[in-house]
Image (cartoon, helix red, strand yellow):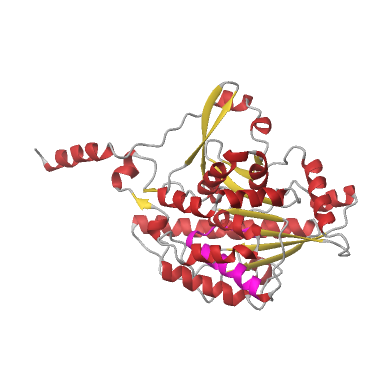
Amino acid sequence: MPRVCIIFFLGLITASCATPIKHTPLTAAEFSQVDFQQLIPERWWGDTLPDGVEEGFKAAVELVIARHAGDGTPVSNALVLSGGSANGAFGVGILAGWTESGKRPEFDYVTGISTGAMIAPLAFLGSDYDTALTEAYTSITKEMVYRTEGIASAIWGSSLASTKPLEELLEKYITVDVVRALAAEQRKGRNLSVLTTHFDALRPTVWDITAIASNRGDAAAPLIRRIILASAAVPGLFPPVTIEWEYAGKTFTELHVDGAVTSQVFAYPPQIRVGELDKALGIKLKRRVFVIQNGNSISFYEPAPVSTISIIKRAISGLLLSQLNRDVERIYYVTQRDGIEFNTISIPDNYKANRSSEFDRDYMLELYDLGYATAKTGNFWQKRPRAEEVGFN
C-alpha cells in the first residue's frame, strides 16, 4: 500500500477519537423569536444598552450609598481585569501587592475577560482570597490548564486541546461556598460580571455572575464555572463551551468562546451615560475605575519572520495588542465623559511579556513578583492610558 494511503487510513482511525463538540443551535428565525431577557435575565449584550438599566442602576446605587452612610460623599470603586492568558499572574501580583500597601478598596463592581474572568470572582470577594489566587497563578502548569489532543483533533475535532484540566481547576476554586458568598454580596448592591463571546451571534455577552449566584440555587455553581471556562476558551486552541437552555418546549445549545474575541477589556457600554444617570436620579457618589491590563501596552522591535505560521502568529499578536490598547482608551474616554476617576496599570515597558498559553510556572512567578513589587507602595496607578501619555499609536 502506498505510504500516502497508509497515512490517510491512520488519520481516519485516529479521527474516531476526535469528535467535534455537540451543538444543537437555534435557526436564525428561532433565535429572533426567543425572549432572552425572560429566559436569562442575568445577562445582556455588551454592545447595546440593557433593558431596565435605569431601574437596576438606581437600586444598586441606593444599596452602595446605604453601605457607606456616614462617610461623607460615598466612593464607589470598580475593578476591570483584561485578558492576557498566563500574564494574569501580573494582575494577581498587583492585587496582592495592593493589599499589602493597605490601600486596596472594596470593589462595588468587577468585570473580567478571559484570564481576567478567572481572577475576577476571588478578587471581587476581597483580600481574604489573595492566598488562593496567588496559589492558582504561581503553582499552575500547562498540564493543569489543558491537554494537547493532537493533529486529528485539529482536523476532525473542535480544537487543538482539551480543557478538562481547567474544568477541574475551576471546580477547586469556584466552590459552592464561593458562589454563596457571591450571592450574599449581590444583596449588598455589589456586582461581578464576566464577558464571553456568543459564537453563534458573534457578539459580546455580559453575564451578571452575582445575580446568577443569587437566583439559580444549586444550578448556579456549574453554570458560573462554564461561563468562566467559556470566557477563557481561545478558539482553535480550546473548544467552544456549550451552554444548554430550554425555551417554549425546545432544548437548544449556544456556543460561547473567549470574551477577548470581541473585547480585550470591558467596563460598561458607552450607551450607559453614568454621569447623566447620576444627575437625573439625584445621586451624589464619587466613582473610580481601576483597569489592570495583563500585558504590555507597547510592542517591541524584533526582526520580522518570513515563514507562513510565524507571520500569522506575529500579525495576530499585533492585532491583539492594538485591540487591547484601543479598549483601554475607550474606557478612558467614556469615564472622562461621565466624570469618573480613571486609573490603569500595565506590565512595565522594561519587561517584555509573552502572550503564549504555555503557562510556564517560573515565568508566571516572575510576573507575579513584578506585579507585587509594582503595587506594594500603593502609589502605582497611571491616570491616563499610554496613548494619552506619550502619543503612542
Kindly report the secondary structure that dominates the magenta region of the rendered protein. Answer: helix
The spot of residue 114 in percent (x, y) is: 54, 53
Asked whether residue 237 appears in the rendered view, the answer is: no
Work out whether 236 lies above or below 352: above
The spot of residue 35 in percent (x, y) is: 66, 28
Q: Which residues are magenta?
A: 80-100
Per the image, is 97 magenta? Answer: yes
For the point 65% across and 58% down, which residue is it? 125
Residue sticking out furthest to the left = 1
Residue sticking out furthest to the front = 177
Camera-side residue of 345 and 364:
364
Q: Quadrant of residue 362?
A: bottom left
Camera-side residue of 238 and 122:
122
Residue sticking out furthest to the right = 282
Asked whether residue 59 appears in the rendered view, the answer is: yes
Q: Quadrant of residue 124?
A: bottom right
Residue 262 in the figure: left or right of residue 340:
left
> What is the quadrant of the C terminus in the image?
bottom right
Residue 235 in the figure: left or right of residue 269:
left
Work out whether 121 lies above or below 205: below
For the point 51% across and 56% down, which residue is it? 319
The spot of residue 28 in percent (x, y) is: 56, 26
Work out whether 76 lies above or below 300: above
Camera-side residue of 169 and 281:
169
For the point 80% across and 56% down, which residue is it? 338
Residue sticking out furthest to the top = 249
Per the image, is 161 magenta? Answer: no
Work out whether 205 lies above or below 35: below
